[in-house]
Image: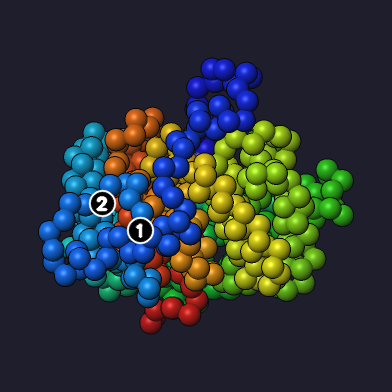
């Protein structure tokens, strides 16, 4: 997504020059070096001593042994969030009034405020979110069906915000409208794709989001099953057509290209199918999903990164939408579901590539920016409890604290959740509570933390 990169010198650039064009060199020492230097931003600040904020290249750990973020770093993040929120609100005054998507529009801003409410428990954020929800619900356009780019996003977020405000009637109304989209999703004859941004997996996410945020049963199992079946049937059909039934039983394409990444490709679709809330039966997981994942794994570059599509052999993009930062989520989920070490090993290698090449010149956003790449470390930290990954996430957050200072390209929607500032704020706020963080509009809350209905 958003691959509008200048094509100059495209055919002349070798690996390293190419990398330099897309990402900044990572100026931070990695965890081992920093950890051996001991806590640098800990003790003194926590005791209230005045001291200038550490330089970005200072060695040391921004968290304590128990994984809690040190006070000095917390304060810097809180101050930056306030500052960026102000800039964002100012900037949004001239944003497209009709873009209601979670990806670039008002639902994304509603999601950000919902996140700030979750992290701070400050009710004013919830009311802010409601303001944006109301705005989006007046502007549904019926053109697309997914959480990220279609009407399912505003409706699902609306249902959750109203539920939290105990406005159950309004919440139910949103859910009913969301379920009315179902018919177009499961229709066999439609040319709807299956990927996350515009296709069935993006509608499935909206259903699963409701069941994790409001409570199990909010969307009945049969509705979820219907969508899951449509996705699986579609994958089987293409696999047969392409004569790949043996190697990759579930094959998907978007605009006639077999994309690999999270946004348009197989990693995003398999990731959704492996969610426990999707309730895909064990046999389908083992016989269909697992070999397909292994097929994608074999397309891995030597660097540990992944191609943007099966036919692409250049190791270029390290984005959530294309490349390791999206595929890593599929691998982590595969590790949880199939419990085989190879998935975790591959995920760790993705993390190394993201650490080296993840500070993107495209900016600080979620889809193809530093914040989205930073989330891969937070998720890997959850999975492994290895502080190396918390450290890497904190360093990417530190980079985001210098928002705008690196000379990155300005995205088309500079204040939006997936391309711009709202995404960086979302990531920074998750650093304040890393143990409950999750990639917006993609990761689901763990089932053990189901709220009361
Ligand atoms: Zn992107």
Quadrant where the C terminus sits is: bottom left
Q: Which residue is disc 1 drawn over?
A: 60
Do we see residue 328 in this rendering?
A: yes
Q: Residue at x 39, y 52 (%)?
A: 395
Q: Residue at x 30, y 71 (%)?
A: 164
Q: Say how the picture is coloured.
A: rainbow
Q: Position of residue 317 (x, y in %)?
A: 57, 38
Q: Nearer the viewer, residue 422 or 164?
A: 422
Furthest residue in direction front, as rendered: 37
Q: Nearer the viewer, residue 10 or 221?
A: 10
Residue 54 - label: 2
Report whether the residue tagged 1 is closer than 8 Å to ligand 1: no
Q: Earlier in the sequence, mark 2 or mark 1?
A: 2
Q: Residues within 10 Å of mark 2 (few under 14, many from 20)?
A: few
Q: Nearer the viewer, residue 353 or 263?
A: 353
Contact flag, marks 2 and 1 (Cβ < 8 Å):
yes
Residue 317 - label: none
Give the vertical position of 142 relative to 167 (above or below): above
Give the vertical position of 222 relative to 180 (above or below): below
Q: Would residue 23 appear left or right of 301 to someone viewing this image?
A: left
Q: Secondary structure at mark 2?
A: loop
Q: Residues within 10 Å of mark 1 (few under 14, many from 20)?
A: many
Furthest residue in direction bottom, as rendered: 452
Q: Position of residue 41 (x, y in %)?
A: 27, 60
Q: What is the spatial separation of the Cα atoms under label 2 and label 1, in whole angstroms? A: 10 Å
Q: Position of residue 53 (x, y in %)?
A: 21, 52
Q: Would residue 49 appear left or right of 23 to someone viewing this image?
A: left
Give the vertical position of 354 relative to 450 (above or below): above
Q: Secondary structure at mark 1?
A: loop
Q: Residue at x 52, y 59 (%)?
A: 205
Q: Residue at x 58, y 30 (%)?
A: 16
């Amino acid at each position: 997504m958003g691959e509008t990169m200048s094509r100059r010198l495209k055919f002349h650039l070798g690996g390293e020059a190419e990398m330099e064009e897309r990402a900044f060199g990572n100026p931070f020492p990695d965890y081992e070096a920093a950890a051996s230097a001991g806590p640098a931003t800990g003790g003194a600040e926590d005791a209230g001593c005045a001291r200038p904020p550490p330089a970005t290249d200072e060695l040391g750990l921004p968290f304590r042994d128990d994984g809690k973020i040190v006070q000095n770093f917390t304060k810097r993040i809180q101050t930056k969030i306030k500052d960026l929120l102000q800039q964002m609100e100012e900037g949004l005054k001239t944003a497209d009034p009709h873009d209601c998507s979670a990806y670039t529009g008002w639902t994304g801003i509603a999601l950000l405020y919902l996140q700030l409410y979750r992290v701070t428990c400050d009710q004013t954020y919830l009311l802010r979110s409601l303001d944006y929800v109301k705005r989006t619900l007046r502007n549904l356009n019926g053109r697309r069906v997914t959480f990220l780019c279609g009407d399912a996003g505003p409706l699902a977020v609306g249902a959750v915000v109203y539920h939290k405000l105990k406005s159950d009637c309004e919440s139910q109304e949103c859910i009913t409208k969301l379920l009315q989209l179902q018919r177009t999703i499961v229709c066999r004859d439609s040319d709807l794709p299956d990927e996350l941004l515009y296709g069935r997996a993006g509608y499935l996410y909206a259903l699963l989001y409701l069941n994790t945020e409001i409570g199990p049963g909010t969307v009945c199992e049969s509705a979820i099953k219907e969508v899951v079946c449509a996705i699986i049937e579609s994958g089987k059909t293409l696999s047969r057509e392409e004569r790949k039934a043996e190697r990759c039983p579930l094959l998907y394409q978007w605009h006639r290209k077999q994309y690999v990444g999270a946004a348009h490709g197989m990693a995003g679709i398999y990731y959704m199918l492996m969610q426990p809330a999707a309730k895909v039966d064990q046999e389908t997981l083992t016989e269909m999903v697992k070999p397909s994942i292994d097929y994608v794994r074999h397309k891995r570059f030597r660097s540990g990164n992944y191609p943007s599509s099966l036919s692409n052999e250049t190791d270029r993009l390290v984005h959530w939408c294309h490349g390791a930062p999206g595929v890593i989520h599929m691998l982590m989920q595969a590790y949880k579901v199939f419990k085989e070490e190879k998935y975790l090993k591959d995920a760790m290698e993705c993390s190394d590539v993201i650490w080296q090449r993840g500070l993107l010149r495209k900016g600080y956003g979620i889809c193809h920016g530093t914040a989205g790449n930073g989330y891969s470390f937070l998720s890997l930290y959850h999975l492994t409890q290895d502080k190396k990954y918390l450290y890497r996430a904190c360093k990417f957050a530190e980079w985001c604290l210098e928002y705008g200072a690196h000379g990155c390209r300005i995205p088309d929607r500079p204040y939006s959740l997936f391309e711009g500032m709202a995404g960086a704020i979302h990531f920074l706020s998750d650093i304040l509570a890393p143990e409950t963080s999750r990639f917006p509009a993609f990761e689901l809350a763990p089932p053990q933390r189901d709220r009361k209905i």
